[in-house]
Amino acid sequence: MSYNEAKRKYAKMGIDTEKALKDLAAIPISMHCWQGDDVGGFESTGGASGGIQTTGNYPGKARTPAELMQDLSFALSLVPGRHRVNLHACYGIHEGKVADRNRLEAKHFAPWVKWAKKTGVKLDFNPTFFSHPLAADGLTLSSPDPKVRKFWVEHGVRCLDIAEYFGRELKSPCCINFWMPDGYKDEPSDRLGPRLRMADSLDRIFAHRYDRKHVVPTLESKLFGIGLESYTVGSHEFVMGYAMKAKILALLDMGHFHLSESVADKISSFLMTFGKVAFHISRPVRWDSDHVIRQNDDLRAAAQEIVKMDPKNFILALDYFDASINRVAAWVLGMRNLQKELLKAMLVPWKALKGMQDSGEFTAQLVLQEECKNYPAGAVWGEFCRRAGVDGDEAWFKRVVKYERDVLSARG
């Protein structure tokens, strides 16, 4: 079906496809840099550790800042719209001796800002509370050792300054997300103590002066991590309570809940509580294994909630790291899948469906919900891509295959 035919069909249902195309183009998604090199960073040759794990050994991963920037630029060129890039603190670029995390400065990220200005993207940020000798026992901000806590508090403060630098230089507020893997492998004897210590450490970090015009701090919960299966300090309840008290945003990650929970169901409550929702889009399989997101029911439900509650109220970022497949393809597929589900949600007559729900017309509601699933959203997606100058179908993958042959294969 052509776009014009789809446009007429949707118009009969009261849907303006032109508005949907315009609205979708205005939604930025933050592409996570750590998919490109398996959460390695540029501090050492070691891989991710401390509650997380990347699986797979597909050839061609980025080994240097230049290679990672090249891969990011190429991936973004295959995704319609204008987007952001999400950096972790371990991706600082050091000349000579590597600065430890409690000594990071804006200068270590100046090349990233230069690249962002050249590429036309904005930057988000994350302190890195893992893959470090002082995180080897699984405890950072909640450590019973005051020296360890002091180190990680200093890291958090430095990261706030770097986030402010991003926001000011790029003239767009930088979302800085705090996630700590702290916890225990086996049942703890004291659950309260670590949480009190973590709250105190966070208080010390956020007591640091930073400009909220340039910085949006968020705090992310976790269900469990590898080697930290029995107890997580920064649980969902801890994060919700602390974020409300500190007047920052709690962040939802789709992979950080029990598989039987509907993360989409939590979104409206978060919006009511915080006025804005920070959201990491990921996909768990059996556990928080961070698979590339697919157009499944979970993603569809989340996208529908985002659209119904206005995308302007959301900070959206991807978060997964799959080393079993081409890493550039993983980025592109995830970004496009989220955009497709957002578009599908924009092509549903939510006002009419809400009226049916409120008036108790549940049969009519069910029928319309189901029939909408077979409307020609693909034709509208194709038009969106055409106007953006990118491939609307799987032809984009041919470009990735060529890039792998010409660029990635030379990396060994």
Image (cartoon, rainbow, N blue to C red):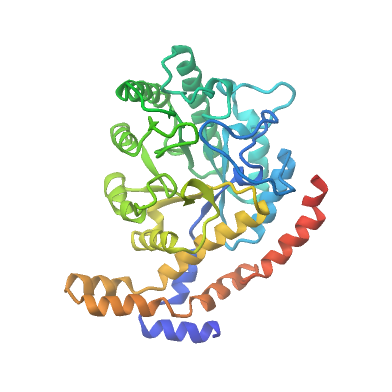
- Quarter residue 292 falls in: bottom right
- Is residue 75 at least partly visible in the picture? yes
Residue at position x 40%, y 52% in the image:
314
Rendered location of residue 209, percent (x, y) = 42, 25
Residue 211 is left or right of residue 370, and the answer is: right
Residue 233 is left or right of residue 329, and the answer is: left
Q: Name the quadrant of the N terminus.
A: bottom right
The correct choice, above or below, for 98 with respect to 273 in the image is: above
Rendered location of residue 140, percent (x, y) = 47, 23
- Depth check, front residue: 146 or 289: 289
Residue at position x 53%, y 82% in the image:
3
Q: Name the quadrant of the C terminus.
A: top right
- Quarter residue 102 falls in: top right
Rendered location of residue 118, percent (x, y) = 68, 48
In the picture as drawn, the residue positioned furthest to the front comes out as 186
Rendered location of residue 377, percent (x, y) = 48, 76
- Is residue 23 at least partly visible in the picture? no
The correct choice, above or below, for 266 with respect to 43 in the image is: below
- Depth check, front residue: 150 or 321: 321
Residue at position x 34%, y 54% in the image:
262
